[in-house]
Image (cartoon, rainbow, N blue to C red):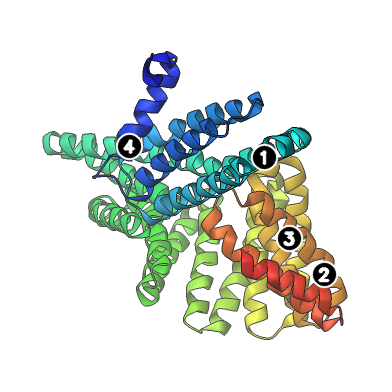
């Protein structure tokens, strides 16, 4: 009986998926490469000739886990940089595992019998490393699911607008707005910008016709447009868009302060960021102070709702003050942000861990700026541990920030004369 004929139905299906994807000439190369590597991995374990069933269990785990992400990804056919990077990392992890299995094959039977207890550790290590490479792709699948659903909504509303523009044009704009936000989360910056440009254009026309109804929607799209322009380095245009959003939201606050003050405060935060990027530090400082004041008032009224926003604007205020050389004031602001976010992360770790880590890192930088390296060290240690735990969610982002945090940790160690530890931290940073 051939190997193919002896496979169980589910196993047979998984192998067929891997073979089909491995032979694809239309998918982005990292996806077929990963499929080919899994097939090589399976063959390498078959050739290992070990009586330890854990190796066969590892084969099934890797085969099924990879197929679970590679099959739906192949249907989507992604070609964006982020997804390709994640598949490249998976491929590298599989190739490393193959290397370890090849080394295992070179061990004599007598040596293998003596080291049976070590097999479990080796297998566990390989499994964990491959799991770390697979998880970001599972997260990416959630993004693609949301993206595809929203793209379908956009397509449907375009068709409906042709028949009934008055009813469906606002809904088309809302779907484009949602699509832009999803694409931004997925690091597809140019596509996100394209969607929000169209949303803003539609809403501008709607606001000309019915200002009272659509000005709020226009401000929302202008705010998003500014963020998208900023993300691709078009800073002057980003500033113009956020200025218009702020102007609209100021007028809306006069009419309905309870409804629109939170939106204005968030736009002021973005406005401050754009001003800062264009070296308008004094103006940026004034704007973010106003945003903090608004959020403080909102927190007194609804603490559970607005504490996260207050922490965000305090974080931004600290950055603005630091840029102006006002280090002591920057430290006070970031300490308050850290206190708030520490409470939030204790209640909802998944929701607030990333923001908490970023505020901790800013606190460490401010302490370093004041020469307080002894105080900065434990903060950096906590930051590094948080970044490690977040790495699987956004590897490309956390590779960079983890490296920076390790380098800063090394710098503080060096300033305190702890050169051997500093060298170790720098070596780890450069291996990331």
For the image shown, how many numbered marks are present on the structure?
Answer: 4
Instruction: Looking at the picture, tell me which residue is in the foreground, 323 or 83.
Output: 83
Q: Position of residue 336 (x, y in %)?
A: 77, 63
Instruction: Looking at the picture, tell me which residue is in the foreground, 231 or 28.
Output: 28
Residue linked to disc 1: 108
- Earlier in the chain: of badge 1 and badge 4, it is 4
Q: Nearer the viewer, mark 1 or mark 4?
A: 1
CA separation in Å, label 3 and label 4: 39 Å
Q: Are discs 1 and 4 less than 8 Å apart at CB?
A: no
Q: Position of residue 280 (x, y in %)?
A: 51, 84
- Earlier in the chain: of badge 2 and badge 4, it is 4
Residue 299 appearing in the image: yes
CA separation in Å, label 1 and label 4: 36 Å
CA separation in Å, label 2 and label 4: 48 Å
Q: Residues within 10 Å of mark 1 (few under 14, many from 20)?
A: few
User: What SS does tag 4 mark?
Assistant: helix
Q: Looking at the rendering, which quadrant does residue 57 occupy?
A: top right
Q: Position of residue 75 (x, y in %)?
A: 31, 34
Q: Nearer the viewer, mark 3 or mark 4?
A: 4
Residue linked to disc 4: 21
- Earlier in the chain: of badge 3 and badge 4, it is 4
CA separation in Å, label 2 and label 3: 10 Å
User: What SS does tag 3 mark?
Assistant: helix
Q: Nearer the viewer, mark 2 or mark 4?
A: 4
Q: Position of residue 330 (x, y in %)?
A: 72, 75
Residue linked to disc 2: 377
Residue linked to disc 3: 383
In the image, is residue 402 above or below residue 10? Answer: below
- Earlier in the chain: of badge 2 and badge 1, it is 1
- Earlier in the chain: of badge 2 and badge 3, it is 2
Left or right of residue 340: residue 150: left
Q: Residues within 10 Å of mark 4 (few under 14, many from 20)?
A: many
């Amino acid at each position: 009986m051939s190997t193919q004929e002896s496979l169980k139905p589910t196993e047979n299906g998984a192998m067929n998926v891997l073979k089909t994807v491995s032979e694809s000439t239309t998918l982005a190369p990292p996806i077929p490469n990963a499929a080919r590597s899994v097939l090589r991995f399976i063959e390498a374990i078959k050739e290992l000739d070990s009586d330890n069933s854990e190796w066969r269990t590892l084969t099934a785990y890797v085969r099924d886990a990879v197929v679970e992400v590679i099959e739906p990804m192949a249907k989507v056919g992604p070609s964006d940089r982020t997804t390709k990077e994640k598949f490249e990392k998976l491929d590298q992890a599989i190739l490393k595992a193959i290397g370890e299995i090849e080394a295992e094959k070179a061990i004599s039977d007598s040596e293998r019998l003596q080291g049976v207890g070590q097999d479990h550790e080796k297998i566990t290590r390989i499994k964990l490393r491959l799991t770390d490479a697979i998880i970001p792709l599972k997260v990416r699948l959630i993004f693609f699911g949301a993206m595809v659903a929203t793209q379908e909504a956009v397509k449907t509303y375009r068709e409906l607008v042709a028949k009934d523009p008055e009813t469906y044009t606002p809904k088309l704009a809302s779907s484009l707005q949602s699509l832009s936000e999803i694409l931004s989360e997925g690091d597809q910056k140019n596509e996100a910008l394209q969607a929000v440009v169209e949303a803003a254009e539609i809403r501008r026309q709607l606001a000309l016709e019915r200002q009272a109804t659509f000005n709020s929607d226009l401000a929302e799209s202008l705010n998003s447009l500014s963020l998208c322009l900023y993300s691709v380095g078009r800073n002057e245009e980003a500033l113009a868009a956020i200025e218009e959003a702020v102007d609209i939201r100021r007028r809306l606050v006069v009419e309905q302060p309870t409804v629109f003050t939170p939106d204005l405060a968030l736009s002021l935060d973005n406005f401050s960021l754009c001003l800062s990027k264009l070296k308008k530090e004094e103006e940026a400082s004034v704007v973010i102070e106003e945003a903090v004041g608004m959020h403080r008032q909102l927190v007194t009224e609804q603490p559970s709702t607005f504490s996260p926003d207050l922490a965000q604007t305090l974080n931004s205020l600290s950055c603005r003050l630091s840029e102006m050389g006002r280090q002591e004031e920057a430290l006070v602001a970031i300490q308050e942000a850290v206190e708030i976010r520490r409470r939030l992360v204790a209640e909802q770790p998944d929701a607030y861990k990333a923001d908490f880590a970023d505020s901790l890192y800013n606190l460490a930088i401010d302490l370093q700026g004041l020469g307080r390296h002894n105080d900065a060290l434990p903060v950096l240690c906590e930051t590094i541990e948080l970044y490690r735990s977040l790495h699987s969610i956004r590897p490309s982002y956390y590779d960079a920030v983890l490296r920076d945090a390790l380098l800063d940790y090394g710098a503080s160690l060096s300033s305190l004369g702890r050169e051997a530890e500093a060298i170790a931290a720098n070596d780890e940073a450069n291996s990331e």
